[in-house]
Image: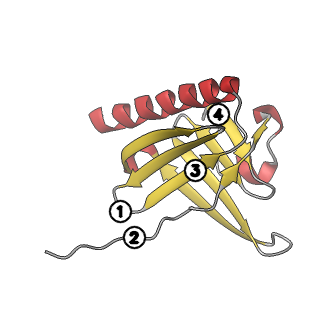
Amino acid sequence: MAYLKYKELAQYFNFFDKLDIKHLPKYVTDYMEDDEIIYAAYATYRDKCVFTDKKILLLDQKGIFGKKKKIHIFPYCSISSSAIEYNGTKTAILLSMDSGYQLRLNFVKMSAENKTELRKIYFKLIENIENKVQN
């Protein structure tokens, strides 16, 4: 039996800023459906992560000026397992995809209130994963 280990897709994302979902840039909302409900959005200096009721949208900007962009869309039905990890002021959401890829989303400089909010988002994520599996 062969064992393949996949490199983590996003091991260096350290989100530290929560974005106002009413004022997301158009280039972010272009990748969402009109009826999609946005739970929360986070950012690094250049990258963004959006949690909706249908998927996780990850906008990865590369290069010095951020001209190269990679957009990852993770529908909940493609997630096979998940975990949330707390470590001081850091929180991480770990996801395993059906394809074998691992995704780690780090959230840094989190207050107790921010951790509670992230936990609620994580529970919504789990609920959506379970609903997709049952349907």
Asked if 9 appears above or below 53 in the picture, the reply is below
Mark 4 or 2: in front is 2
Query: CA separation, marks 3 and 2?
Result: 16 Å
Residue shown at 73%/50% (left/top)?
28
| 47 left or right of 84 in image | right
Task: Indicate the position of residue 22 as horizontal and vertical percent values.
Answer: 80, 32
| 52 left or right of 25 in image | left
Find numbered disc 1 in the image and state the secondary structure of the residue it sits on: loop
Q: Where residue 6 is drawn, which disc sits there?
A: 2
Q: Give the residue pinned by disc 1.
A: 99
Which amino acid lies under the numbered mark 3 shown in the image of this protein? Leu
Mark 1 or 3: in front is 3
* Callout 4–callout 3 Cβ contact below 8 Å: no
Q: Give the residue pinned by disc 3.
A: 105
* Callout 3–callout 2 Cβ contact below 8 Å: no
Query: CA separation, marks 1 and 4?
Result: 25 Å
* Callout 1–callout 2 Cβ contact below 8 Å: yes
Residue shown at 19%/76% (left/top)?
2
Quarter that holds the C terminus: top left
